[in-house]
Every structure is written in structure tokens, then in C-alpha cells.
Amino acid sequence: MTKRMIIMLASLGVLFGGIFGFQAFKAHMIKKYMSANMAPPVTVTTIKAEETPWQPELKSVGTLRAVKGVDVTTEIAGQIRVVSFKSGQDVKAGDLLVQLDADPDVAKLHSLEAARDLAKIVYNRDKAQFDAQAISRAQLDADASDLSNKQAQVDEQRAQVAEKTIRAPFSGRIGITTVQPGQYLNPGDKIATLQQVDPIYADFSIPEQQIPGLVVGQKIAIAANAYPGQIFSGKINAIDPKVDPATRNVMVEATIPNSKRQLLPGMYASVAVDAGGVHNYLTLPQTAVAFNPYGATVYVVEESRGPDGKSMLVAKQRFVHTGSMRGDQVAILSGVKVGEIVVTSGQIKLKSGSHVIVNNKVVPSNDAAPKPVDE
């Protein structure tokens, strides 16, 4: 019995040893097959994560508006006798612009002045007689009332004569006009536009969430499409005390020096407002960050050992917390360390652990203030 038991146990040992050996051999061959047939490496572009100075900015668009601007008109009808300005001319407050024919009004003024002078003589004579008790108080009061009435008529006619002389209400630049001497003007007819453009206002709106970053006197910079690449500086001089309930925006008014008069009312303006001090943020191109319902992610390139023991580059996915954006860049608040290599393009083919090859001959734009390029 003992001999038979030993033979049975030895047979079982050989059987199980063969089974386990076969399984180990099969696992080895499968691993070898998989390593020989792993996915080919993905070509990507990368960038080294670095900190850069970052000036927080509030961006908006606005419209330029003259500090003072009116359409010069006439309050009274009349025929133009003299046009004393040229289109595009700079004028000062009080300068004569247009003189209407006022001869009939001046003649009537002289007539009323003569009647007033006569009423004054009568009043003075009757006052002397009243002092001598030759006439009653009622007669003197009637003379005083008549004199006041005549003076009021003179003042009214003098004002009407003055309305025939149209002067600049403030200093500025006169616009293009089509009025000519001899032309008849009706009340309200436009003569020309008058605009004071130095300085000039920039009106723009800011979302209500960004109101805490605004203060009167804060510096701003604007860019106009008419002057590409040129920046005009100014400062905020008024913030509307009411938020528009339809847009949830607040209107802001800024003053821009305009000594060269390059900026004109009605121009479109891109506005940037410096909000707070300069910070150092880890900055990446926006193309490096993938946004999805689970959060923002990036791929970081690391060295690893392949199945054959050789060194290789692999991409590891990480979740990041992003901050502000400017131009082509985004600030990374957490998730990536300074000096790490981050994939900037080619992520669509990656998954965490993918073998990658870096080719940075053509890389995505990483400009803090990109500008359009005409081809």
C-alpha cells in the first residue's frame, strides 16, 4: 500500500507540474505576443510648463463718443446771408458760423427802441409832475407799466435778432456742411455737426460679476480697427449706478486723450481693463487642455520602461484646475508642476499610458496677444 501511495502521489505531482508549467508557458507567450503587437506610438507636440507674469484683465467692446457733440441748427427761420466756416474747420466757442438775414428784425428793433425811449421820457416827465403833486399816482404807475412793457418788447426783439446769428456753442471740429448763402433755413434744419473729440469718451459694458474689479480712475487700453497694432490709453471716469436687468451688464465711461484726433465718435473699440496686480501663473496653450463633463484634463509626458525593458515616452492623463484665459493661453492653477512636459496637440488619439513620439517642428500658437495675419 505504501508503495502504491507513493506512485500515485508522484504521478499527481507530475500531472499538476505539467499543468502549471503549461499555464506559465502560455502566459509568457501571450505577453510576448502582446508586446510584439502593442499599439504604434502617437506623434504629439509638447511644451515645457513654465510660469509667466500675468496681468488680470477685463475684456469688453465699446463705442467711442464725443465729450461734446451736437448738430448745429437754427431756432428761427431765415435766409442765409453769410457762412463763416469751412467743412472740417476747428472753431472756438462763440465763433460765428452762420449769419441769417436780420435787416427787417433790426429795423423793428430800432422802432421798438424809439418807442421805449419815448415811454422813458414820458415817465421821467410825469414823475417830476407827480413830485410836484400835479398828477396822480395812478398816472405815474401807468407810465411805469408802459415803460416796462416797451422795454420787454425791445428785449424780445433783440433776442430774435441774436437768433439770426448762429455761433459755435463750444470749441470743436465742424463737420461737412451743404448750406450756402442765399439758402432758406427752417427751424431745426441741420447746418453741420460740431464735435469735441479731444479727449474722447469710450462707452462699454462689463458683466455684473466683474463689477468688484472696477474703480473710478482705473487705467484702460483700447484698440481701434482703424489703427491696427496701436494702443490708446485712458482711465475710467464714471460707472453707471444701475445694472441693466436685460443683459446683467453695467455701463462704464472712460476718457481717452486724443490730441492727434485719430479717434472719432462712433468708432468700434476693443477695451482691456487692468484688474488687480500682476501674478505669476503656470501657463499653457489652450490647445493643451481638453474640457469635458468630468473636468479639464491634460496629458503629461513621462519616461517609462517598455515590455522589452527599453526606455520610452508615455502620456499620462491628469485633471487640472484652470484659471483666466488670454489670447492663446490659459492659466493652470493646479494639476501640473513647473518643468513638466505637456502635450499641446495630438491628444485625440491618446489614452493614459499611450506610447508617444514628440515632434515639435510645427507647434500650436502660444501668444498672449495674438493678432490677425493677412495672407
Image (spheres, rainbow, N blue to C red):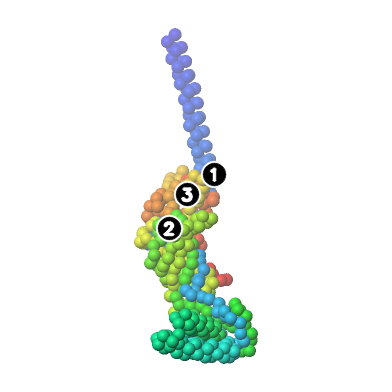
Task: Please tell me the numbered disc located at residue 296.
Answer: 3
Query: Which of label 1 and label 3 is nearer to you?
Result: 3
Which residue in the structure is indicated by mark 1? Answer: 37
Q: How many marks?
A: 3
Q: Which mark is residue 211?
A: 2
Residue 199 figure quarter: bottom left
Rendered view: 138 above or below 205: below
Mark nearer the viewer, 3 or 2: 2
Name which of mark 3 and mark 2 comes first in the sequence.
2
Q: Quadrant of residue 128?
A: bottom left
| Amino acid found under the numbered disc labelled 2 | Ile
Mark 1 or mark 2, earlier in chain: 1
Residue at the front extreme, as displayed? 134
User: Is the C-beta separation of discs 1 and 2 under 8 Å?
Assistant: no
Q: Is residue 61 at all visible to an observer of this figure?
A: yes
**Residue at screen point 63% across, 89% down:** 182
Q: Position of residue 311 (x, y in %)?
A: 43, 49
For the residues marked 3 and 2, what is the alpha-carbon distance in whole angstroms? 27 Å
Q: Quadrant of the C terminus?
A: bottom right
Tag 1: Cα neighbours inside 10 Å, few (<14), some, or many (≥20)?
A: few
Given residues 214 and 276, the one toward you in this image is 214
State the residue at coordinates (50%, 50%). Answer: 291
Return the residue nearer the eye: 20 or 220: 220
Q: Mark 2, residues whose alpha carbon is within 10 Å: few (<14), some, or many (≥20)?
A: some
Q: Image point 60% across, 79% down: which residue?
A: 187
